[in-house]
Image (spheres, grey):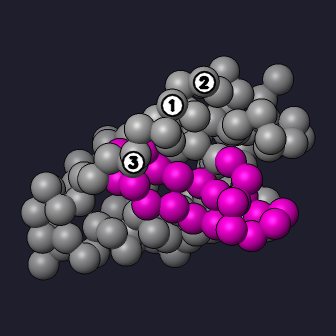
């Protein structure tokens, strides 16, 4: 049985270029150390949302669910905290995943300087 998470729980994520796939982006959840990859930040956030849902389904206790990202990801997030991904992209990503018992909500999704300005709030 999956663990129950409060609906008001918020997550933070950092979007940055993939080191493995040229031209792809990674969306990395800080609280859970799960990622999504895609051809653009929107696709990466969609895949991250799916990964959070899978993580939730596979856990039976909160201690299994929360596994923070490595320090270097937190540092990327902190260094780029003023480069926020467009809210419409985050909303579109979350709404594109079929509704489940728990739909992750993001407090803040930031982008490193390598993410094109078109995805970042002015």
**Around disc 3, counting alpha carbons within 10 Å, would you say few (fewer than 14), some (14 to 19), or many (20 or more)?**
some
The reply to whether the magenta stretch includes residue 84 is no
Q: Which residue is mark 3?
A: 69
List x then y, in percent, for residue 105: 45, 47
Magenta residues span 16-37
Mark closer to the chain start, 1 or 3: 3
Q: Quadrant of the N terminus?
A: bottom left
Q: At 49% from the left edge and 70% from the top edge, which residue is drawn?
A: 50
Q: Which residue is mark 2?
A: 79
List x then y, in percent, for residue 34: 43, 60
Vertical position of residue 42 compared to residue 88: above or below? below
Mark closer to the chain start, 3 or 2: 3
Q: Is 7 left, or right, of 49 in this rendering?
A: left
Of 89 and 119, which appears nearest the observer? 119
Vertical position of residue 56 compared to residue 68: above or below? below
Q: Is 26 left, or right, of 12 in this rendering?
A: right
């Amino acid at each position: 049985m999956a663990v129950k998470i409060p609906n008001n729980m918020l997550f933070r994520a950092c979007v940055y270029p993939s080191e493995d796939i040229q031209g792809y982006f990674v969306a990395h959840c800080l609280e859970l150390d799960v990622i999504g990859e895609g051809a653009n930040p929107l696709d990466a956030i969609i895949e991250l949302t799916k990964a959070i849902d899978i993580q939730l389904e596979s856990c039976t206790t909160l201690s299994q669910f929360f596994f923070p990202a490595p320090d270097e990801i937190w540092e990327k997030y902190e260094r780029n905290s003023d480069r926020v991904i467009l809210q419409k992209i985050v909303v579109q990503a979350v709404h594109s995943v079929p509704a489940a018992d728990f739909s992750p909500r993001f407090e803040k999704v930031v982008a490193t300087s390598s993410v094109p300005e078109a995805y970042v709030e002015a």
